[in-house]
Image (spheres, grey):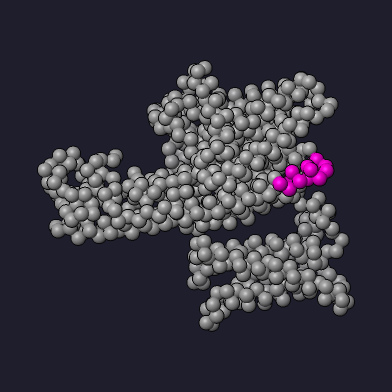
Amino acid sequence: MKKIKRLLLKYKEVIMYLIFGVATTLVNWVVYSLLMKTSAVNMTISNAIAWFTAVVFAYITNKLFVFESKSWNVAEVWKEVVKFFGARIATGVVEIGGLPLLYYIGVKQSLFGVEGFVAKILVSVIVVILNYVFSKIFVFNKRINKHVLYRKIKGKWLAGAAVLICGLVTHGYILTNKISYHDDSVNYFGVGTTFESGRWALGLIQKFLTKIDFFNYSSSWWNGLLSILLVAVCAMILSELFQIKHTGYAVLVGVLLISFPAMTSLFAYMFTAPYYMFAVLLMISAVYMTVKYSYGFLPAIIMMGFSMGIYQTYFGVATTLFVLILVSDAETRNFIENIKEAFKYLLTLLGGILCYFLGNTICIRNFHVTLLDYQGINDMADVTVKSLIGSVKNAYIGFLQPILGEFCGISNQKAVRILYLAVYLMVGVLVLRRLCKRGMELWNRIYFFVLCCLIPLSISIIYVMAVSDKTVIHTLMIYPYVFGLIYPIVLLEKENLKGKFWKGISVFYCTVAILLSIYYIRLDNIAYLKANYQQETATAYYTEVISQIKSTEKYNSNLPVLFYGAAGSMDDSIPILWRFDDIQLQGYSNNMHDFISYYAGKEFLELHCGYTYQEPENRETIIASENFQKMPCYPCDGSIKIIDGVVVVKWSNFEVR
């Protein structure tokens, strides 16, 4: 009882703020709801009136019960009022502007019969947090200056907060709109391919969840938000790992992690997004444990193997982080200690690979699975010296791709390639400075040089893993590239450089990182816009086809349906918006014709058009018949007809299976 009492006293201010924060929010919601329900006032004006009423209530309760400001001197009270209302105006702008912004990007859901109430709740949560910070620091507590504030607010918390806020801005569209096609349509209630693709850990997770009746759903809001929370945890661990204390750097780490286009490609596969992000978290945690604890490499090996068992390409996250840690800490140890540490990390990586292959072998034998030939999965262990040398060469070229030309959709603009070049040059300058630094022993200097040469290889290690010619590198595979953008932060934070030149370098890097982040946030949202447009267009297109099927003479719903060829391939009326051609991110790169004819057509019809059908048993017989051969291609008259009790829709003269 005494412990509870001490805790209540210790956190009294926070508890009281939460109580009256909730009360203030309720006042806001009640006033908003009443105005929306009982008056002709529009949403924006109702929101503004609700905000003003809540601010008056909040000032009184905050002064009397939360921060217990004792002064009733007119001058002091006036200062408090001005500061309080100034702070609330700032957060009011967030609330008044945030509500229609969220509404515009798709958060339109009603709750309790009130239009836009879900968006209202989201904005209110953000505003409550901001209001506490402003009230605590600027209004009712005059003793805390900005230097104390910086010490109180740790970099890792800022990095996590940056992920959450930027995550909603960047990915809010797909969180609140269900975009489902290709793999997502097929795996609406699953996690995707597992054991047969070498993703044995993902298969084990699926079996465990099925065992406890926790079935998977491709829920945009749940899966997306959970993924963003996992990224926030990753950002916090990275900030701790690299000891990032500068608030600006910490925020940039979070923003880059969540806005990098590999996250957007991941959300195209929403059904498995949180599992993949869990794999990233495992990799980062494994590195952290190896670096921070003497025997941390032991659990780290298992974590790495399990992470690769979810998605193999995230192995590059571990290789990149290990090399960055070795480079940043090279001066803190002598040569022998550095070699020992590097050898420890190398053994951990090799142990992780061994653990992955061991788990894969056990699952293949236990569940009697045959590996697919997709992306050269079968060739993963068939490495020769010649193929390895070629893969290493491709890795170094791949590292330079973002500055050489279009690369997996992340650098299709010349300005972006220039920004990447600027980041790479800054890394070169910082590395060269340390390499030429006085006092470093010769062997350590050689060791440092070798490590720097390994940075490109560690980031683009996917090229070494992709030993097969069948493997196509795409956006989802290149998440480790984001650490190349973060690397200057590690060097700048470590060096703590003084002087105008180095401060200028720091400001220049922050400017470049901000510009890249803004570009990627915009790119991500355009990708979601493209996907939404294509989904709506395909839904309307297939709805028209279904209408024609049902209008066919002698049609009934028990008849099987045969779709032959590439859907829409002969239909010139399908719109092509060339403006979307620049979007080449994995999951969003199809043009409209490809989108309509993609392999998940049947599942798409069920999910978006409410139409299901049975495929005919005599498919080949019908295709070989004279009636079928004489049919024109859709949308020509006669391209939909009933042959031998089967509804036939002939898309084209060639088959796509």
Task: Pick out the residue farthest to the left.
Answer: 626
Q: Which of the 4 image quadrants contains residue 536?
A: bottom left
Whether residue 477 is visible here, answered yes or no, is yes
> Is 460 positioned to the left or the right of 573 in the image?
right
- Give how far across and how far down residue 111 sits, in percent: 51, 68
The answer to which of 122 and 441 lies nearer the viewer is: 441
Residue drawn at (46%, 28%) of the image = 363
The answer to which of 632 and 135 lies nearer the viewer is: 632
Q: Give the quadrant of the N terminus.
A: bottom right
- Give how far across and how far down residue 543 sits, in percent: 30, 58
The answer to which of 569 and 178 lies nearer the viewer is: 569
> Is 351 positioned to the left or the right of 412 in the image?
right
The reply to whether the magenta stretch includes residue 501 is yes
- Determine whether 157 is above or below 536 in the image: above
- Give how far across and how far down residue 461 sits, in percent: 56, 30
The reply to whether the magenta stretch includes residue 388 is no
Residue drawn at (55%, 74%) of the image = 43
> Is 29 positioned to the left or the right of 372 in the image?
right
